[in-house]
Amino acid sequence: MVSKQSETSDGTFYFQMNRPYCLCEEVSFILPTPESKDFERPKEDSYIEGTMRIDFKKPKQIEYEVWLAREDSSENIIIPQGPFPSIREAKLINIDTPYGRFRFILEGFKDAMRQATKMCESWIPYEENKVEAIDA
């Protein structure tokens, strides 16, 4: 997983690099729950509307899936759905959602994506591990 903290608040942008294909995928945002009394928290597995703006181009209307929004947690995970602007060459991402506005400066992030791809494609053997229950 590769992540970047928001420059304006406690939000985090991240994506995952999974073997065996070594593609940057599962672009997501971890966002804090606003402290406003008027805020109505979206339900987990629902969809919310927002915008995404890459660099200084026109904002694009985006639908986000609310992947995680538990009452006992102060963080929420949303995932952009459908076609959204490419982030591969992005230097700046602005999102506006019911959770608030967030800015992520991605200067040099392209290099991090390239390094994650190289590590994923490295000679280190890949072996799928089975999940087993453990007694705690």
Image (cartoon, rainbow, N blue to C red):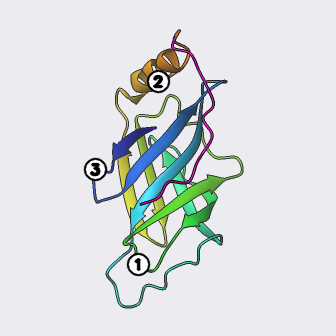
Location of mark 3 (residue): 7
Q: Is residue 123 above or below residue 33?
A: above
Q: Residue at x 49, y 81 (%)?
A: 41
Location of mark 1 (residue): 72
Task: From the image, state whether disc 1 or disc 2 is nearer to you.
Answer: 1
Q: Magenta segment range?
A: 124-136
Which residue occupies the foreground of this view, 119 or 7? 119
What predominant SS class does the magenta segment belong to? loop
Q: Is residue 128 magenta?
A: yes
Where disc 3 sits, the SS reads loop
Q: Is residue 42 above or below residue 32?
A: below
**Based on the displayed image, in which of its 4 quarters is residue 74 positioned?**
bottom left
**How far separated are the C-alphas under marks 3 and 1?**
26 Å
Which residue occupies the foreground of this view, 86 or 18? 18
Q: Position of residue 110 (x, y in %)?
A: 44, 25
Q: Is 70 positioned to the left or the right of 11 in the image?
A: right
Q: Residue type at mark 3: give it.
A: Glu
Query: Which labelled disc corresponds to residue 116?
Result: 2
Q: Position of residue 52 (x, y in %)?
A: 53, 53
Q: Residue type at mark 1: give it.
A: Asp
